[in-house]
């Protein structure tokens, strides 16, 4: 009987330790931001290619390739069943001037409180809610041989 009680205590202790280990916060890192020492090696007027060779591939580039490159990283804490929480975010923006050389290097953090608006570009869909066969047959009446033969 004493052996069963001891085994039950061990099992309960193991179960309690297992439950407590599930409540430990887990951290995940995403992205890449160069260290301050690496950013110090970037000089004004330096070309885009040499910046990328020094710092590595950027996370993103501006829509117009001449405007700038971005390095971004974030640290997210996952704790049990709670929603993930971003505890650190850094963005490094390297801007290029009209001559193609570096004009500015900026670092933004979560504490800066800057919200970057995201644009959503949606292509207008002109197709009506009809079946493929109905669309195909609907185009038969619009056939014009003159446009195919190059006649106007």
Image: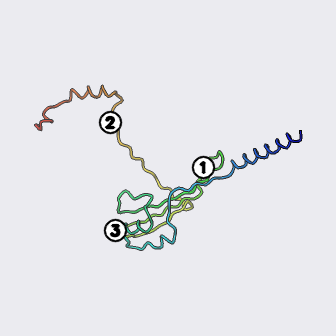
* Apparent side of residue 95 relative to residue 138 in the rendered image (left or right): right
Residue assigned mark 1? 84
Q: Residue at x 48, y 70 (%)?
A: 38
Q: Residue at x 64, y 46 (%)?
A: 82
Q: Is residue 146 above or below residue 62?
A: above
* Apparent side of residue 137 relative to residue 33 in the rendered image (left or right): left
Q: Residue at x 42, y 47 (%)?
A: 120
Q: Position of residue 48 (x, y in %)?
A: 37, 66
Q: Is residue 56 above or below residue 118?
A: below
Q: Mark 3: few, some, or many residues within 10 Å (few <14, many ≥20)?
A: some
Quadrant, the C terminus: top left
The image's mark for residue 57 is none
Secondary structure, mark 2, is: loop
Viewer-nearest residue: 11 or 115: 11
Q: Nearer the viewer, mark 3 or mark 2?
A: 3
Q: Mark 2: few, some, or many residues within 10 Å (few <14, many ≥20)?
A: few
Q: Position of residue 50 (x, y in %)?
A: 38, 69
Viewer-nearest residue: 18 or 122: 18
Mark 3 or mark 2: which comes first in sequence? Answer: 3
Q: Given contact means CB atoms under 8 Å apart, are the residues at marks 2 and 1 in contact?
A: no
| Distance CA(mark 1)–CA(mark 3) | 40 Å
Q: Mark 1: few, some, or many residues within 10 Å (few <14, many ≥20)?
A: some
* Apparent side of residue 116 relative to residue 152 in the rendered image (left or right): right
| Distance CA(mark 2)–CA(mark 1) | 39 Å
Residue assigned mark 3? 100
The image's mark for residue 126 is 2
Mark 2 or mark 1: which comes first in sequence? Answer: 1
Viewer-nearest residue: 20 or 85: 20
Q: Nearer the viewer, mark 2 or mark 1?
A: 1
Q: Position of residue 86 (x, y in %)?
A: 58, 54
């Amino acid at each position: 009987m004493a052996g069963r009680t001891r085994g039950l205590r061990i099992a309960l202790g193991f179960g309690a330790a297992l439950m407590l280990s599930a409540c430990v916060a887990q951290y995940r890192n995403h992205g890449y931001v160069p260290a301050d020492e690496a950013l110090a090696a970037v000089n004004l007027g330096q070309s885009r290619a040499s910046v990328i060779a020094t710092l590595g591939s950027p996370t993103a580039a501006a829509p117009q390739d001449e405007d700038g490159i971005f390095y971004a990283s974030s640290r997210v804490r996952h704790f049990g069943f709670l929603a993930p929480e971003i505890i650190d975010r850094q963005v490094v923006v390297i801007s290029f001037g009209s001559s193609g050389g570096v004009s500015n290097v900026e670092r933004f953090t979560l504490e800066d409180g800057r919200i970057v608006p995201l644009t959503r570009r949606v292509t207008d869909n002109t197709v009506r809610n009809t079946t493929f066969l109905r669309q195909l047959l609907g185009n038969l009446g619009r056939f014009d041989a003159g446009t195919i033969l190059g006649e106007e």
